[in-house]
Amino acid sequence: MKNDILKYLRDKEYISGEVLAKKLGVSRVAIWKQIQRLKDIGYKIIADQNLGYYLISRPDLLLPQEIQNGLSTAYIGQKIYYFPELGSTNIIAKEKALRREEGVNEGTVIIAERQSAGKGRLGRKWFSPEGGIWLSIILYPQLSPSYISLITLMTAVVVVKAIKRYTQIKAQIKWPNDILINNKKVCGILTEMSAELDMINWIVIGIGINANIDYREFPEDIKKSSISLKEILGKEISRVRLVQIFLKEFERYYELLKRWEISLILKEWKLYSHTLGKKIKVNIGEKVVTGEAIDINEKGALILKKKDGELIEIISGTII
Ligand code: BTN
């Protein structure tokens, strides 16, 4: 009912409790209770005895009703689980995907205002205070596990495009999935999956964007290497708007990927790449390889040209 009330309140005009009650087929007391709930979560609503209710402002929260208002996707983000605070959205998403909870369909999103145990790659912690965008998307693609790298690359492309569309800022992708602005990390992506030999059971893609974070907040160890959109723009952004743009683009690119139309994804990845053309060292688990990053292939692997001219394909690793 909260959503229905908000629809009527959005018109920037007073609306009386009586009219609202009639429109929604409930009592005036029921309306009053819902208005109190909206106020509790940060909506500023005034109530005039004669004129009725008036919405002054919405909270800057990533509330499902705010994100879904005007979100024209078919399935990505059509179901959102929202938490003011959570350990990690990836952990909750994995639990839900594993149990295949009812209603947890492809495209379900878990969002938290802050995470107390945000997860980064390679077992690292992810700094997740209020003001950032911390979300995970659950997918059940009927694809082979070898697609996992491509899905991560695709997500990185979509983040760059969403940031560009909303802020005009050109971010870059450091292979495999760090998003950089001015050589500093503004977003990280953590993809986790469960799969059989030839089929993915579920994928959880966790995206962390340093949106409205003050640079003074970053802990010492990541202060030099991190940046936020607020810091670059000198003002806060509408996180709701950025999430909407991101989810819409995500669905478009994910549909392309499912149809194996990956040329656009690869082309854009190369266009935004911070890595190609550079001499790099990559930790691939058991050893470190050095060479020039010259290409990315259709599996999402990085092609490295060693000093002796040998080309090697790296499907997963970390640039050091
Ligand atoms: C990285 O190390 O670069 C990946 C960071 C991924 C962080 C996001 S925030 C939302 C989601 N939930 C988590 O616990 N981690 C990911």
Image (cartoon, helix red, strand yellow):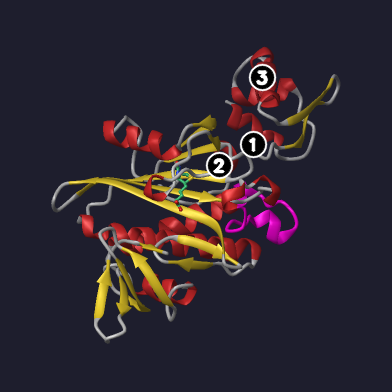
Q: Is residue 242 left or right of residue 270?
A: right
Residue 128: in magenta span: no
**Relative vertical location of residue 25 with respect to residue 241 in this rendering, above or below:** above
Does mark 2 have its CB less than 8 Å from ligand 1? yes
In this view, the residue in front, 32 or 143, is: 143
Q: Amino acid at mark 2?
A: Ser
Q: Amino acid at mark 1?
A: Lys
Quick check: marks 1 and 2 in contact, CB under 8 Å?
no
Q: Residue at x 65, y 63 (%)?
A: 167
Query: Secondary structure under badge 1?
Result: helix
Q: Quadrant of residue 226?
A: bottom right
The quarter of the rendered structure image containing the C terminus is: bottom left
Q: Which residue is mark 2?
A: 128
The quarter of the rendered structure image containing the N terminus is: top right
Residue extent of the magenta highlight: 223-241
Q: Is residue 131 left or right of residue 55?
A: left
Q: Which residue is mark 1?
A: 7
Q: Residues within 10 Å of mark 1 (few under 14, many from 20)?
A: few
